[in-house]
Amino acid sequence: MKKKTKEFNNRRAWLYVCTALVLLALVLVIATAAQMHGSQNKNPLGPGFGSSENGTADKELPPLASVEIDTDAEDAVLDGILAIRDVGSYAGLYMEDGSNEVVSGVMMLIVENISGKDLEYAEITLTFGDKVMSFSISTLKAGAKAVLLEKTRGKYPGQEPDAVHIANVVYFETPMQLYSDVFEISGVSGALNIRNLTDIAITGDIFVYYKNAATDLYYGGITYRARIEGGLAPGETKQIMTGHYSINGSEIVMVQYTG
């Protein structure tokens, strides 16, 4: 009897040891997970930037660090096409070349399309003595505003320009369309889903254009384009991977298709 009791006590002691080891392992796992979560939250890109599940940037674009200049409305209007609403320095992601590298002090313009027509493309130059700052804008609908960054990442001189010019202006022949009665477009960060809502086959390629966007501003003159090859059968849905689309930081601005 004493032998059985001793064996029972040994088993119970061993059970306690095993239970303690399991609990200790759980504590270590939880502590490690919490530490990893904390380190992930310390994003080197700063507040509002996080990694989505597919590893692409789910961007909440940062506020502008802008400096207004004193200029009358007439001088800020470029040939009745674009109005320069603000000039200053920018800190955040550099979008114009698609790199999304973090920059600071880059010269920026906030422009508004006042032409009454959808703008396909335009170039703007500002001259400061012997220094020329260049900007471009694409796919800007009538009445919309965009933040443009200097094309060579030039720094803001902090003074009024000697001259401002606009060139190579191209308008869309027809207004920008989303064709929401033909396509249903939904997105996740890094991908777009396009569905044919009609009972008619779309035989040609479909192009979806989107821009970086936050509040009432587009960020960057750049416009991204996703291509769906081979069209869509009636009711069919296709997914296309995109390098720069995010749910909270992008807006679809136009769709083009044939057939």
Image (tube, rainbow, N blue to C red):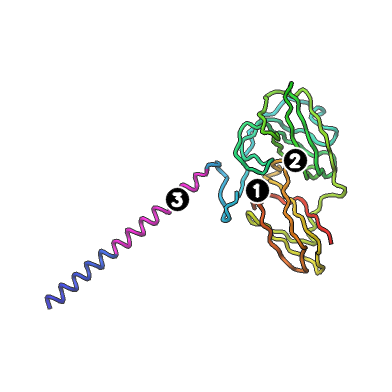
Q: Position of residue 30 (x, y in %)?
A: 40, 56
| Magenta segment | 19-43
- Can you identify the residue that label 3 sits on? 36
Tell me the mark number nearer the camera, choosing from 3 and 2. Answer: 3
- Say what secondary structure mark 2 lies in: strand
Mark 3 burial class by Cα count in 10 Å: few <14, some 14-19, many 20+: few
Classified by dominant secondary structure, the portion drawn in magenta counts as helix
Question: Could you say where residue 92 lies in the image, as x and y percent from the top left?
Answer: 61, 38
The answer to which of marks 1 and 3 sits earlier in the sequence is 3
Q: Residues within 10 Å of mark 2 (few under 14, many from 20)?
A: many
Q: Check the image and name the residue furthest to the bottom.
A: 1
Against 5, residue 181 (above or below) is above
Q: CA distance from mark 3 to mark 2?
A: 40 Å
Residue 248 percent coordinates (x, y): 64, 50
Q: Which residue is mark 2?
A: 145
What's the residue type where badge 2 is placed? Answer: Lys
Q: Amino acid at mark 1?
A: Gly
Image location of residue 102, percent across then percent down: 59, 39
Q: Is residue 18 above or below residue 67?
A: below
> Which one is earlier in the sequence, the residue at label 1 or at label 2?
2
Residue occupying the point 39% across, 57% down: 29
Look at the image and say whether residue 29 sits in the magenta stretch. Answer: yes
In space, the residues marked 1 and 3 are separated at their CA atoms by 26 Å
For the point 75% across and 68% down, the residue is 235
- SS for callout 1: loop
Outermost residue toward the top? 129
Residue positioned most to the front: 230
Frontmost of labels 1 and 3 is 3
Residue under pointer 1: 249
Residue 85 quadrant: top right
Cα distance between the residues tagged 1 and 2: 15 Å
